[in-house]
Image: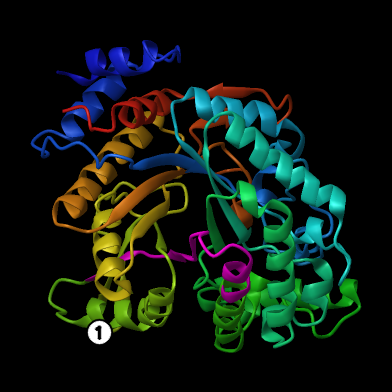
Amino acid sequence: MTVSNWTRRNVIAGGTALAVTASITASINAAIAGAPRRSFPKGFIWGTATAAHQVEGNNTNSDWWLLETVPGTIIKEPSGAACDHYHRYPQDIATIAKLGLGSYRFSIEWARIEPTAGHYDIRQLDHYRDMLRVCRSHGLHTVVTLHHFTSPAWLAARGGFEDPATVAAFTAYAEAVVRHCGDLIDTLCTFNEANLSFSDFIPATALAPMLDAAKQASGSPAYRSYLFDDSARSKPIVRACHVAARRAIKTIRPNLPVGLTLAMSDIQDAPGAPGAGIAERSKRYDVWLELARGDDFVGVQNYTRERFDTKGSIPPPAGTVRTQLDQEYYPAGLAGAVRYAASVARRPILVTENGIGTQDDTLRARYIAEALSGLQGCIAAGIDVRGYWHWSAMDNFEWLFGYGPKFGLIAVDRVSQVRTVKPSAAVFSAIARANVLPV
């Protein structure tokens, strides 16, 4: 059966009137030609994801809100109203459900829950509880992330995750969320991409003007923001936060699955440099994957690959298609990252993010099919992969890059906030409804 007829049966008949263009049909059929004809496991979870700061808008109490506007900022533009998901979540969640997806992963914004140290805003806790309730009303499996890059401004002002006192603060925040909302949470991630720090690849000289301005604006020379801190100092504290929060959450809800998510490129040896990529991969990921052995799962987040020789990373091959983040188009990287994570962590895998920043929606549809074909191979090899969440539900605020990169299954007009479901969403919807690739 070709994808055009298959999609009509599984999407249109399912009640979602989405058109799949001829070009997308051709791309998908080409991408999966020769792929094994396997269904995904029964009960496999299909979902999509967002992060609070990227979609909610007006997150004024967070460290990022300050960083976006200080002199010398390296952030392309302010987040502003973002996608106004804070107010439009009922509509957005309904759209996700209409696509035939079974899960929504979103983050709770710590800066809203605890706007000042030690003060928990019951209205904001109720807000997120209602988001969870709306998800449940649509039959969606809820995946909550407690920390998706942003922190309360007061936490950053006292040193952020370079301050050992943050372990107690984060644990108390986790307890407050789980006590108030935990009965409606199906899966919980403590941190999003816990291993990532922009400071590891942005020169200190480029960061200094923004961070110095943030210190001045906050009135605190100790100011540290999660993605721009000293990772040698902060990451051990992040790991301690995860362990302490996991212990506290399990005390409240012993059966709630808890883990964290990791940013994982598929790191490979460059041609003629055997072992170089293997060494880098181990250095970058093993401490986190070994930590995850105490969790219920590990969340793998992959977008591309990186190749290393003895001198470091090398550019993608000449002529390679690049994404809007200048990454190599390499959907096969998902399978490579999943295989490595499973081999070290020895825990069930959730693909909590995978996607592509591109204006070319045909390319997005092809990427989805190719990445999922590789994921099927992992499952066929015996790896326990339990779900896949596409990044992202909507075009949104992409951190340093502002609103330029388009990752969404749903377009969002920056002025009117009108949502438009993209053709690639129809392809993903069809796969999710049928629980099989359309070969």
In the rendered view, does 404 fall on the left or right side of 291?
Answer: right
Residue plotted at (74% across, 40% down)? 86
Q: Is residue 356 visible?
A: no
Q: Is residue 175 above or below residue 83?
A: below
The residue closer to the viewer here, 322 or 148, is 148
Question: Which image quadrant for residue 318?
Answer: bottom left
Task: Report the magenta residues as a range.
Answer: 247-268
Residue plotted at (42% across, 74% down)? 292
Q: Position of residue 25 (x, y in %)?
A: 26, 21
Q: Position of residue 220 (x, y in %)?
A: 87, 81
Residue plotted at (56% across, 22% down)? 420
Q: Quadrant of the N terminus?
A: top left
Q: Position of residue 425 (x, y in %)?
A: 43, 28
Query: Which residue type does callout 1 highlight?
Result: Thr
Element under label 1? loop
Q: Is residue 15 above or below residue 323?
A: above
> How did the renderer colour the structure?
rainbow
The residue closer to the viewer here, 199 or 109, is 109
Q: Residue furthest left?
A: 34
In the rendered view, does 344 fall on the left or right side of 157?
Answer: left
**Which residue is disc 1 drawn over?**
310
In the rendered view, does 375 fall on the left or right side of 130?
Answer: left
